[in-house]
Image (tube, helix red, strand yellow):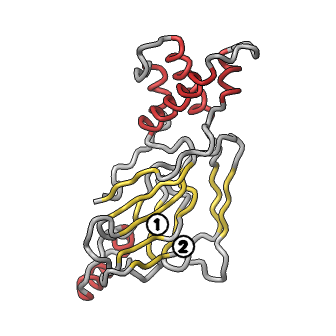
Amino acid sequence: MSYCRQIELPTAEPVSLASMRQWMRIPSALTSDDTTISTLLKAARESAETITGRAIAQRKFCMVLDAFPYNPDSNWERSNFHDYNRGLFSRSREIKLPFPPGISVDPIQVVASDGTITSLTQGTNFILDRISEPARITPLPGSDWPASLYVANAVKIPFTAGYDPDPTVVSTSTIAGSTPSQQPVSTVVTGIPATLAVAIMQLANFWYENRGIEGQVPKHIEQALWSQAVIDFNPTR
């Protein structure tokens, strides 16, 4: 079983109050509704995240699992399964991180089988694949996830995900060392797509002009958000 919660609030909304005021053509001297507009922008972003399955505002999350995926205790089972299908064996151990785009993963905290807390670090104990969507983590080649105590939330994975409010931002990550065991450089566009920014402004403006129906999403805005939705038929459970 897996769950994921945000553990930090966004440092910035993807659409600024200034951008929204310009969109709505509000005179600079009229500021009495600024608090309302900011609240509607946040609510519109949250609705967009629910529809798309994305973290539109960049922030930190924490994913927890009761155990690592498929980590057999039997050497015989592991060996035969590995010989049968190496690709499936590797994929059975991957952990997909929700709310793309994935940016980085902090050290993973594990309740070891003796009850102590151990830490796993990227590049030393696991690999982060930022290019896939959703992003995913796997053990190093030829290794398994460590044994854990079977208790609630035995595995805690803190990670950062979401778009930068600057649409031009491109994130590049480089793995140091002569044997990185993965593609050494990953480059992904993390600036917010214009489609999402415009949809958020349209929705906030719709709620501003139609007080009392906040929460309703017009069909044309919903369709624009669905075009950016994450489709993953096999999430980590």
Q: Nearer the viewer, residue 123 or 31?
A: 31
Instruction: Using the image as rendered, state which of residue 128 and residue 10 is in the foreground.
Output: 10
Q: Amino acid at mark 1?
A: Ile
Counting other residues with Cα less than 10 Å from the Cα at mark 1, is it few (<14), some (14-19), or many (20 or more)? Answer: some
Instruction: State the residue lying farthest toward the right.
Output: 28
Name the side, left or right, on which 184 lies relative to 111.
right
Residue 146 at what x, y percent from top left?
37, 80
Q: CA distance from mark 1 to mark 2?
A: 9 Å
Residue wearing tag 1: 137
Task: For marks 1 and 2, give the one nearer the viewer.
Answer: 2
Q: Say whether marks 1 and 2 touch (CB < 8 Å).
A: yes
Q: Choose top left, top right, bottom left or bottom right for residue 198.
A: top right
The residue under the point 58% across, 22% down is 37
Picture coordinates of residue 145 (x, y %)? 38, 77
Secondary element type, mark 1: strand
Q: How many marks?
A: 2
Above or below — where is 25 with respect to 52?
Answer: above
Q: Which residue is mark 2?
A: 122
Q: Is residue 171 above or below residue 88?
A: above
| Quadrant of the frame with the N terminus | bottom left
Q: Residue at x 51, y 71 (%)?
A: 107
Secondary element at image label 2: loop
